[in-house]
Protein backbone atom coordinates (compact mmCIF):
# COMPACT_ATOMS: atom_id res chain seq x y z
CA UNK A 1 0.00 0.00 0.00
CA UNK A 2 1.14 3.53 -0.75
CA UNK A 3 1.92 5.82 2.20
CA UNK A 4 -1.11 7.95 3.13
CA UNK A 5 0.46 11.26 2.08
CA UNK A 6 0.91 10.23 -1.55
CA UNK A 7 -2.43 8.50 -1.94
CA UNK A 8 -4.93 10.42 -4.07
CA UNK A 9 -7.86 12.04 -2.34
CA UNK A 10 -10.78 11.04 -4.60
CA UNK A 11 -12.66 14.21 -3.70
CA UNK A 12 -9.71 16.47 -4.54
CA UNK A 13 -8.76 14.39 -7.57
CA UNK A 14 -12.12 15.06 -9.14
CA UNK A 15 -12.95 18.46 -7.60
CA UNK A 16 -13.03 20.48 -10.85
CA UNK A 17 -14.99 17.77 -12.68
CA UNK A 18 -17.48 17.45 -9.82
CA UNK A 19 -18.03 21.22 -9.72
CA UNK A 20 -18.55 21.25 -13.48
CA UNK A 21 -20.80 18.22 -13.29
CA UNK A 22 -23.01 19.96 -10.75
CA UNK A 23 -23.26 23.18 -12.76
CA UNK A 24 -24.18 21.47 -16.01
CA UNK A 25 -26.58 19.21 -14.12
CA UNK A 26 -28.56 22.26 -13.02
CA UNK A 27 -29.11 23.20 -16.63
CA UNK A 28 -30.70 19.78 -17.22
CA UNK A 29 -33.42 20.72 -14.73
CA UNK A 30 -34.61 23.92 -16.37
CA UNK A 31 -38.35 24.20 -16.82
CA UNK A 32 -40.74 26.86 -18.05
CA UNK A 33 -42.45 26.64 -14.69
CA UNK A 34 -40.50 28.46 -11.98
CA UNK A 35 -41.98 26.37 -9.14
CA UNK A 36 -40.63 23.19 -10.73
CA UNK A 37 -37.17 24.68 -11.27
CA UNK A 38 -37.06 25.96 -7.72
CA UNK A 39 -37.84 22.64 -6.09
CA UNK A 40 -35.80 20.42 -8.41
CA UNK A 41 -32.70 22.54 -7.89
CA UNK A 42 -33.26 22.88 -4.14
CA UNK A 43 -31.26 19.83 -3.00
CA UNK A 44 -28.45 20.66 -5.41
CA UNK A 45 -27.95 24.03 -3.69
CA UNK A 46 -26.42 22.21 -0.71
CA UNK A 47 -24.08 19.83 -2.49
CA UNK A 48 -24.11 16.17 -1.62
CA UNK A 49 -20.94 14.25 -0.86
CA UNK A 50 -21.16 13.19 -4.54
CA UNK A 51 -20.08 9.67 -3.64
CA UNK A 52 -22.11 8.16 -6.48
CA UNK A 53 -20.67 10.33 -9.28
CA UNK A 54 -17.19 9.73 -7.83
CA UNK A 55 -17.69 5.97 -8.04
CA UNK A 56 -18.85 6.23 -11.67
CA UNK A 57 -16.03 8.55 -12.75
CA UNK A 58 -13.23 6.69 -10.99
CA UNK A 59 -14.38 3.31 -12.29
CA UNK A 60 -14.57 4.76 -15.79
CA UNK A 61 -11.03 6.09 -15.40
CA UNK A 62 -9.75 2.86 -13.89
CA UNK A 63 -11.21 0.58 -16.58
CA UNK A 64 -11.32 2.57 -19.81
CA UNK A 65 -8.93 1.08 -22.30
CA UNK A 66 -9.11 -2.40 -20.78
CA UNK A 67 -12.23 -3.61 -22.61
CA UNK A 68 -12.34 -4.78 -26.20
CA UNK A 69 -14.37 -1.95 -27.73
CA UNK A 70 -12.45 0.96 -26.32
CA UNK A 71 -11.01 2.37 -29.55
CA UNK A 72 -14.45 2.34 -31.15
CA UNK A 73 -15.91 4.17 -28.14
CA UNK A 74 -13.23 6.81 -28.34
CA UNK A 75 -13.81 7.19 -32.07
CA UNK A 76 -17.57 7.64 -31.53
CA UNK A 77 -16.89 10.29 -28.92
CA UNK A 78 -14.56 12.17 -31.28
CA UNK A 79 -17.15 11.99 -34.09
CA UNK A 80 -19.82 13.37 -31.82
CA UNK A 81 -17.49 16.18 -30.85
CA UNK A 82 -16.64 17.00 -34.46
CA UNK A 83 -20.12 16.95 -35.92
CA UNK A 84 -22.57 17.22 -33.07
CA UNK A 85 -25.86 15.38 -33.31
CA UNK A 86 -28.24 16.57 -35.96
CA UNK A 87 -31.29 15.93 -33.83
CA UNK A 88 -30.06 18.36 -31.17
CA UNK A 89 -30.59 21.21 -33.62
CA UNK A 90 -34.26 20.32 -33.85
CA UNK A 91 -34.76 20.70 -30.14
CA UNK A 92 -35.36 24.29 -29.16
CA UNK A 93 -35.11 23.33 -25.51
CA UNK A 94 -31.65 21.82 -25.85
CA UNK A 95 -29.18 24.34 -24.54
CA UNK A 96 -25.66 24.28 -25.97
CA UNK A 97 -24.16 24.25 -22.48
CA UNK A 98 -25.65 20.78 -21.96
CA UNK A 99 -23.07 19.54 -24.40
CA UNK A 100 -19.95 21.21 -23.23
CA UNK A 101 -18.62 17.80 -22.26
CA UNK A 102 -18.71 16.53 -25.81
CA UNK A 103 -14.94 16.14 -25.87
CA UNK A 104 -13.39 13.29 -23.89
CA UNK A 105 -11.99 14.76 -20.72
CA UNK A 106 -8.58 13.93 -19.34
CA UNK A 107 -8.84 14.14 -15.59
CA UNK A 108 -5.26 14.19 -14.48
CA UNK A 109 -1.72 13.57 -15.53
CA UNK A 110 -1.20 9.88 -16.20
CA UNK A 111 0.77 8.22 -13.43
CA UNK A 112 4.03 6.57 -14.26
CA UNK A 113 2.56 3.10 -13.66
CA UNK A 114 0.11 3.55 -16.52
CA UNK A 115 0.93 2.33 -20.00
CA UNK A 116 -1.46 4.62 -21.84
CA UNK A 117 -2.94 8.08 -21.50
CA UNK A 118 -6.17 6.64 -22.94
CA UNK A 119 -6.67 4.78 -19.71
CA UNK A 120 -7.22 8.14 -18.03
CA UNK A 121 -9.79 9.44 -20.45
CA UNK A 122 -13.41 9.60 -19.45
CA UNK A 123 -16.04 9.59 -22.16
CA UNK A 124 -18.82 12.20 -22.36
CA UNK A 125 -21.34 9.40 -21.92
CA UNK A 126 -19.67 8.40 -18.65
CA UNK A 127 -19.83 11.95 -17.33
CA UNK A 128 -23.49 12.06 -18.28
CA UNK A 129 -24.02 8.75 -16.47
CA UNK A 130 -22.49 10.27 -13.32
CA UNK A 131 -25.05 13.07 -13.56
CA UNK A 132 -27.95 10.68 -14.15
CA UNK A 133 -26.96 8.65 -11.09
CA UNK A 134 -26.79 11.80 -8.95
CA UNK A 135 -30.18 12.92 -10.27
CA UNK A 136 -31.77 9.60 -9.37
CA UNK A 137 -30.28 9.78 -5.90
CA UNK A 138 -31.63 13.32 -5.44
CA UNK A 139 -35.09 12.33 -6.68
CA UNK A 140 -35.12 9.46 -4.21
CA UNK A 141 -34.25 11.87 -1.36
CA UNK A 142 -37.18 14.13 -2.27
CA UNK A 143 -39.48 11.12 -2.05
CA UNK A 144 -37.72 9.76 1.03
CA UNK A 145 -38.16 12.97 3.00
CA UNK A 146 -41.89 12.80 2.29
CA UNK A 147 -42.11 9.16 3.35
CA UNK A 148 -40.00 9.72 6.49
CA UNK A 149 -41.68 13.08 7.22
CA UNK A 150 -38.18 14.41 7.74
CA UNK A 151 -37.79 18.11 8.53
CA UNK A 152 -34.08 18.49 7.80
CA UNK A 153 -31.72 17.64 4.94
CA UNK A 154 -28.09 18.78 4.55
CA UNK A 155 -28.45 21.25 7.38
CA UNK A 156 -31.44 23.06 5.89
CA UNK A 157 -35.21 22.58 5.99
CA UNK A 158 -36.13 19.54 3.89
CA UNK A 159 -38.01 19.96 0.60
CA UNK A 160 -41.32 18.82 2.13
CA UNK A 161 -40.78 21.26 5.03
CA UNK A 162 -40.13 24.07 2.54
CA UNK A 163 -42.51 23.28 -0.33
CA UNK A 164 -44.91 20.66 1.01
CA UNK A 165 -45.35 16.99 0.16
CA UNK A 166 -47.13 17.40 -3.14
CA UNK A 167 -44.47 19.58 -4.77
CA UNK A 168 -41.73 17.37 -3.35
CA UNK A 169 -43.18 14.23 -4.93
CA UNK A 170 -43.79 16.02 -8.22
CA UNK A 171 -40.31 17.56 -8.14
CA UNK A 172 -38.79 14.09 -7.64
CA UNK A 173 -40.81 12.79 -10.58
CA UNK A 174 -39.66 15.69 -12.75
CA UNK A 175 -36.00 14.94 -11.99
CA UNK A 176 -36.60 11.28 -12.85
CA UNK A 177 -38.15 12.38 -16.16
CA UNK A 178 -35.11 14.45 -17.08
CA UNK A 179 -32.77 11.67 -15.95
CA UNK A 180 -34.69 9.14 -18.09
CA UNK A 181 -34.41 11.35 -21.17
CA UNK A 182 -30.67 11.70 -20.62
CA UNK A 183 -30.41 7.93 -20.08
CA UNK A 184 -32.10 7.18 -23.39
CA UNK A 185 -29.72 9.55 -25.14
CA UNK A 186 -26.75 7.50 -23.97
CA UNK A 187 -27.99 5.06 -26.60
CA UNK A 188 -26.98 1.89 -24.75
CA UNK A 189 -29.76 -0.57 -24.05
CA UNK A 190 -27.73 -2.53 -21.46
CA UNK A 191 -27.13 0.66 -19.45
CA UNK A 192 -30.76 1.76 -19.86
CA UNK A 193 -31.90 -1.58 -18.45
CA UNK A 194 -29.42 -1.50 -15.57
CA UNK A 195 -30.28 2.03 -14.48
CA UNK A 196 -34.03 1.56 -14.99
CA UNK A 197 -33.85 -1.53 -12.78
CA UNK A 198 -32.33 0.61 -10.02
CA UNK A 199 -35.58 2.60 -9.93
CA UNK A 200 -37.50 -0.59 -9.20
CA UNK A 201 -34.88 -1.59 -6.64
CA UNK A 202 -35.21 1.71 -4.77
CA UNK A 203 -38.96 1.24 -4.56
CA UNK A 204 -38.58 -2.43 -3.53
CA UNK A 205 -36.16 -1.39 -0.79
CA UNK A 206 -38.57 1.20 0.56
CA UNK A 207 -41.52 -1.19 0.38
CA UNK A 208 -39.54 -3.85 2.22
CA UNK A 209 -38.77 -1.26 4.89
CA UNK A 210 -42.40 -0.12 5.09
CA UNK A 211 -43.59 -3.68 5.52
CA UNK A 212 -41.02 -4.10 8.22
CA UNK A 213 -42.20 -0.91 9.88
CA UNK A 214 -45.92 -1.17 10.02
CA UNK A 215 -48.43 -3.63 8.63
CA UNK A 216 -51.82 -2.15 9.24
CA UNK A 217 -54.96 -3.63 7.69
CA UNK A 218 -54.66 -1.80 4.40
CA UNK A 219 -50.95 -2.48 3.88
CA UNK A 220 -51.38 -6.11 4.84
CA UNK A 221 -53.87 -6.57 1.99
CA UNK A 222 -51.55 -4.85 -0.45
CA UNK A 223 -48.52 -6.76 0.78
CA UNK A 224 -49.85 -10.14 -0.23
CA UNK A 225 -50.62 -9.01 -3.79
CA UNK A 226 -47.33 -7.18 -4.42
CA UNK A 227 -44.73 -9.74 -3.48
CA UNK A 228 -41.09 -9.19 -4.43
CA UNK A 229 -39.42 -12.48 -3.48
CA UNK A 230 -40.84 -15.67 -2.03
CA UNK A 231 -38.39 -15.87 0.87
CA UNK A 232 -39.05 -12.26 1.78
CA UNK A 233 -42.77 -12.97 1.77
CA UNK A 234 -42.27 -15.91 4.11
CA UNK A 235 -40.34 -13.68 6.48
CA UNK A 236 -42.98 -10.94 6.18
CA UNK A 237 -45.61 -13.48 7.20
CA UNK A 238 -43.53 -14.41 10.23
CA UNK A 239 -43.18 -10.72 11.15
CA UNK A 240 -46.94 -10.38 10.88
CA UNK A 241 -47.48 -13.42 13.06
CA UNK A 242 -44.87 -12.29 15.58
CA UNK A 243 -42.66 -15.32 14.81
CA UNK A 244 -39.75 -13.46 13.26
CA UNK A 245 -36.29 -14.42 14.43
CA UNK A 246 -33.30 -12.12 14.55
CA UNK A 247 -31.84 -14.15 11.69
CA UNK A 248 -34.92 -13.45 9.53
CA UNK A 249 -34.67 -9.80 10.43
CA UNK A 250 -31.01 -9.73 9.35
CA UNK A 251 -31.91 -11.24 5.97
CA UNK A 252 -34.57 -8.61 5.34
CA UNK A 253 -32.30 -5.84 6.61
CA UNK A 254 -29.37 -6.70 4.34
CA UNK A 255 -31.62 -7.25 1.34
CA UNK A 256 -33.29 -3.90 1.96
CA UNK A 257 -29.89 -2.26 2.36
CA UNK A 258 -28.77 -3.54 -1.03
CA UNK A 259 -32.01 -2.43 -2.70
CA UNK A 260 -32.34 1.04 -1.25
CA UNK A 261 -28.67 2.09 -1.26
CA UNK A 262 -26.18 -0.30 -2.82
CA UNK A 263 -28.01 -1.09 -6.07
CA UNK A 264 -27.58 2.46 -7.41
CA UNK A 265 -23.85 2.38 -6.64
CA UNK A 266 -23.39 -1.17 -7.97
CA UNK A 267 -25.33 -0.75 -11.19
CA UNK A 268 -24.02 2.79 -11.73
CA UNK A 269 -20.48 1.41 -11.45
CA UNK A 270 -21.24 -1.46 -13.81
CA UNK A 271 -22.84 0.91 -16.32
CA UNK A 272 -19.70 3.07 -16.36
CA UNK A 273 -17.70 0.05 -17.48
CA UNK A 274 -20.32 -0.95 -20.09
CA UNK A 275 -20.13 2.57 -21.57
CA UNK A 276 -16.36 2.14 -21.79
CA UNK A 277 -16.94 -0.65 -24.32
CA UNK A 278 -16.38 -3.70 -22.11
CA UNK A 279 -17.46 -6.82 -23.99
CA UNK A 280 -19.51 -9.69 -22.65
CA UNK A 281 -17.37 -12.20 -20.78
CA UNK A 282 -14.81 -9.61 -19.66
CA UNK A 283 -14.28 -9.41 -15.93
CA UNK A 284 -14.29 -5.61 -15.49
CA UNK A 285 -18.07 -5.23 -15.23
CA UNK A 286 -18.22 -7.82 -12.46
CA UNK A 287 -15.45 -6.05 -10.55
CA UNK A 288 -17.26 -2.71 -10.84
CA UNK A 289 -20.56 -4.23 -9.71
CA UNK A 290 -18.97 -6.03 -6.75
CA UNK A 291 -17.13 -2.87 -5.70
CA UNK A 292 -20.33 -0.76 -5.79
CA UNK A 293 -22.40 -3.40 -4.03
CA UNK A 294 -19.98 -3.88 -1.15
CA UNK A 295 -19.20 -0.18 -0.81
CA UNK A 296 -22.91 0.65 -0.92
CA UNK A 297 -23.78 -1.78 1.86
CA UNK A 298 -20.88 -0.44 3.95
CA UNK A 299 -22.11 3.11 3.29
CA UNK A 300 -25.64 2.36 4.54
CA UNK A 301 -24.39 0.44 7.58
CA UNK A 302 -22.33 3.49 8.56
CA UNK A 303 -25.41 5.65 7.98
CA UNK A 304 -27.31 3.43 10.40
CA UNK A 305 -24.51 3.71 12.98
CA UNK A 306 -24.38 7.52 12.64
CA UNK A 307 -28.11 7.65 13.33
CA UNK A 308 -27.22 6.43 16.86
CA UNK A 309 -23.90 8.20 17.30
CA UNK A 310 -24.36 11.67 15.91
CA UNK A 311 -26.57 14.65 16.61
CA UNK A 312 -28.67 16.40 13.98
CA UNK A 313 -26.22 19.34 13.92
CA UNK A 314 -23.41 17.09 12.67
CA UNK A 315 -25.56 14.98 10.37
CA UNK A 316 -27.47 17.85 8.79
CA UNK A 317 -30.54 15.63 9.11
CA UNK A 318 -32.44 14.36 12.16
CA UNK A 319 -30.39 11.99 14.35
CA UNK A 320 -32.03 9.12 16.22
CA UNK A 321 -34.64 8.94 13.46
CA UNK A 322 -34.66 5.19 12.84
CA UNK A 323 -36.20 4.02 16.12
CA UNK A 324 -38.75 6.85 15.85
CA UNK A 325 -39.67 5.50 12.41
CA UNK A 326 -40.04 2.00 13.89
CA UNK A 327 -36.88 0.75 12.15
CA UNK A 328 -34.57 -1.84 13.63
CA UNK A 329 -31.25 -1.34 11.83
CA UNK A 330 -27.93 -3.12 12.45
CA UNK A 331 -27.29 -1.80 15.96
CA UNK A 332 -30.78 -2.81 17.16
CA UNK A 333 -30.58 -6.23 15.51
CA UNK A 334 -27.25 -6.96 17.20
CA UNK A 335 -28.67 -5.69 20.51
CA UNK A 336 -31.50 -8.25 20.11
CA UNK A 337 -28.88 -11.03 20.08
CA UNK A 338 -27.52 -9.75 23.40
CA UNK A 339 -30.79 -8.68 25.04
CA UNK A 340 -33.70 -10.99 24.13
CA UNK A 341 -36.10 -8.33 25.51
CA UNK A 342 -35.38 -6.29 22.38
CA UNK A 343 -37.30 -8.90 20.34
CA UNK A 344 -40.70 -7.74 21.60
CA UNK A 345 -39.85 -4.09 21.09
CA UNK A 346 -38.69 -4.75 17.54
CA UNK A 347 -41.75 -6.85 16.70
CA UNK A 348 -44.05 -4.07 17.84
CA UNK A 349 -41.99 -1.37 16.05
CA UNK A 350 -41.26 0.57 19.24
CA UNK A 351 -44.81 1.92 19.11
CA UNK A 352 -45.77 1.99 22.80
CA UNK A 353 -44.90 5.03 24.91
CA UNK A 354 -41.35 4.69 26.23
CA UNK A 355 -40.40 1.95 23.71
CA UNK A 356 -38.03 4.17 21.73
CA UNK A 357 -36.11 5.24 24.86
CA UNK A 358 -36.00 1.67 26.17
CA UNK A 359 -34.74 0.29 22.87
CA UNK A 360 -32.11 3.02 22.61
CA UNK A 361 -30.92 2.09 26.07
CA UNK A 362 -30.62 -1.61 25.14
CA UNK A 363 -28.68 -0.68 22.00
CA UNK A 364 -26.26 1.56 23.86
CA UNK A 365 -25.72 -1.10 26.56
CA UNK A 366 -25.00 -3.69 23.87
CA UNK A 367 -22.14 -3.85 21.40
CA UNK A 368 -24.59 -3.25 18.53
CA UNK A 369 -23.01 -0.03 17.32
CA UNK A 370 -19.45 -1.42 17.38
CA UNK A 371 -20.52 -4.67 15.71
CA UNK A 372 -22.36 -2.78 12.96
CA UNK A 373 -19.22 -0.71 12.39
CA UNK A 374 -17.18 -3.92 12.18
CA UNK A 375 -19.66 -5.33 9.65
CA UNK A 376 -19.41 -2.12 7.59
CA UNK A 377 -15.62 -2.47 7.71
CA UNK A 378 -15.87 -6.05 6.42
CA UNK A 379 -17.95 -4.90 3.43
CA UNK A 380 -15.54 -1.99 2.76
CA UNK A 381 -12.58 -4.40 2.92
CA UNK A 382 -14.33 -6.63 0.41
CA UNK A 383 -14.86 -3.64 -1.90
CA UNK A 384 -11.15 -2.89 -1.70
CA UNK A 385 -10.24 -6.52 -2.26
CA UNK A 386 -12.20 -6.89 -5.51
CA UNK A 387 -10.25 -3.95 -6.96
CA UNK A 388 -7.03 -5.91 -6.78
CA UNK A 389 -7.63 -7.47 -10.20
CA UNK A 390 -7.48 -4.01 -11.81
CA UNK A 391 -4.18 -2.67 -13.15
CA UNK A 392 -2.64 -0.02 -10.88
CA UNK A 393 -3.68 3.54 -11.61
CA UNK A 394 -4.38 6.76 -9.78
CA UNK A 395 -8.12 6.10 -10.17
CA UNK A 396 -7.77 2.65 -8.61
CA UNK A 397 -5.91 4.16 -5.68
CA UNK A 398 -8.73 6.74 -5.41
CA UNK A 399 -11.30 3.94 -5.26
CA UNK A 400 -9.30 2.29 -2.47
CA UNK A 401 -9.16 5.52 -0.50
CA UNK A 402 -12.91 5.92 -0.97
CA UNK A 403 -13.53 2.65 0.90
CA UNK A 404 -11.73 4.15 3.90
CA UNK A 405 -13.56 7.48 3.64
CA UNK A 406 -16.91 5.74 3.66
CA UNK A 407 -16.02 4.09 6.97
CA UNK A 408 -14.44 7.21 8.49
CA UNK A 409 -17.16 9.68 7.56
CA UNK A 410 -18.92 11.61 10.30
CA UNK A 411 -21.93 12.83 8.33
C1 LIG B 1 -32.60 7.35 2.22
O1 LIG B 1 -32.66 6.41 3.25
C2 LIG B 1 -33.42 6.86 1.04
C3 LIG B 1 -33.01 6.03 0.09
C4 LIG B 1 -31.61 5.55 0.07
C5 LIG B 1 -33.91 5.55 -1.02
C6 LIG B 1 -35.28 6.19 -1.08
C7 LIG B 1 -36.12 5.57 -2.13
C8 LIG B 1 -37.41 5.85 -2.33
C9 LIG B 1 -38.14 6.85 -1.52
C10 LIG B 1 -38.14 5.13 -3.42
C11 LIG B 1 -38.69 6.00 -4.50
C12 LIG B 1 -37.63 6.76 -5.21
C13 LIG B 1 -37.42 6.79 -6.55
C14 LIG B 1 -36.42 7.71 -7.12
C15 LIG B 1 -38.11 5.90 -7.51
P1 LIG B 1 -32.89 6.83 4.77
O2 LIG B 1 -34.25 7.38 4.96
O3 LIG B 1 -32.50 5.67 5.58
O4 LIG B 1 -31.75 7.94 4.93
P2 LIG B 1 -31.82 9.44 5.44
O5 LIG B 1 -31.43 9.34 6.88
O6 LIG B 1 -30.74 10.13 4.63
O7 LIG B 1 -33.16 10.01 5.22
MG1 LIG C 1 -36.06 6.52 4.48
MG1 LIG D 1 -34.98 9.28 5.39
Image (cartoon, rainbow, N blue to C red):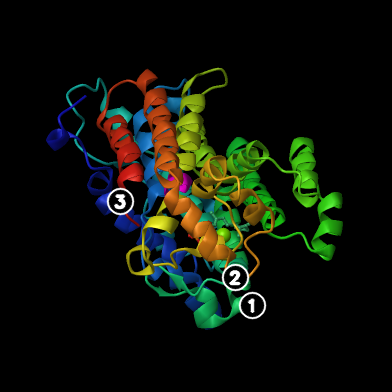
Quadrant assignment for ligand 2: bottom right
Look at the numbered disc 2 and give the secondary structure of its residue: helix
Q: Is residue 300 magenta?
A: yes
The answer to whether one can see residue 80 in this image is no
Name the residue that disc number 1 marks. 166
Between the C-alphas of marks 1 and 3, the distance is: 34 Å
Q: Position of residue 105 (x, y in %)?
A: 31, 43
Q: Mark 2: few, some, or many residues within 10 Å (few <14, many ≥20)?
A: many
Question: Of the residues tagged 1 and 3, which is closer to the observer?
Answer: 1
Name the residue that disc number 3 marks. 17
Q: What secondary structure predominates along the stretch shown in magenta?
A: helix
Q: Looking at the image, is 182 positioned above or below residue 90?
A: above
* Residue labelled 2 has its Cβ within 8 Å of some atom of ligand 1: yes
Q: Mark 1: few, some, or many residues within 10 Å (few <14, many ≥20)?
A: few
Question: Of the residues tagged 2 and 3, which is closer to the observer?
Answer: 2
At x 52%, y 79%, the residue is 161
**Which residue ends up furthest to the left in the rendered image?**
5
Q: Is residue 367 magenta?
A: no
Frontmost residue, 54 versus 333? 333
Q: Looking at the image, is 218 positioned above or below residue 180?
A: below
Q: Along the horizontal axis of the image, is 121 left or right of 67?
A: left
Which residues, given as a range, are shown in magenta?
299-303
Q: Position of residue 13 (x, y in %)?
A: 24, 44
Pointer 1 with pointer 2, Cβ within 8 A: no
At x 26%, y 52%, the residue is 15
Look at the numbered disc 1 and give the secondary structure of its residue: helix
Image quadrant in which the C terminus is located: bottom left
At x 60%, y 39%, the residue is 250
Name the residue that disc number 2 marks. 146
Q: Position of residue 266 (x, y in %)?
A: 51, 38
Amino acid sequence: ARPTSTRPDPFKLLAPQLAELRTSLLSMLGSGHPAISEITKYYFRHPSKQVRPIIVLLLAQATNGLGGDWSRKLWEAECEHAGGRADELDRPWTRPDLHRHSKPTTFSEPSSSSSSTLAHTVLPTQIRLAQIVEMMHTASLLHDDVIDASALRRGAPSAPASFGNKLSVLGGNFILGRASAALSRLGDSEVTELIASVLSNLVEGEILQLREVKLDEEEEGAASSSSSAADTDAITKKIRDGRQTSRDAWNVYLQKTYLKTASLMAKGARSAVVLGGCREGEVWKEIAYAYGRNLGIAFQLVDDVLDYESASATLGKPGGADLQLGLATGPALYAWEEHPEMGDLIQRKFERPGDVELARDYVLRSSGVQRTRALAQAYADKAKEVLQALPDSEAKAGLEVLTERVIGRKS
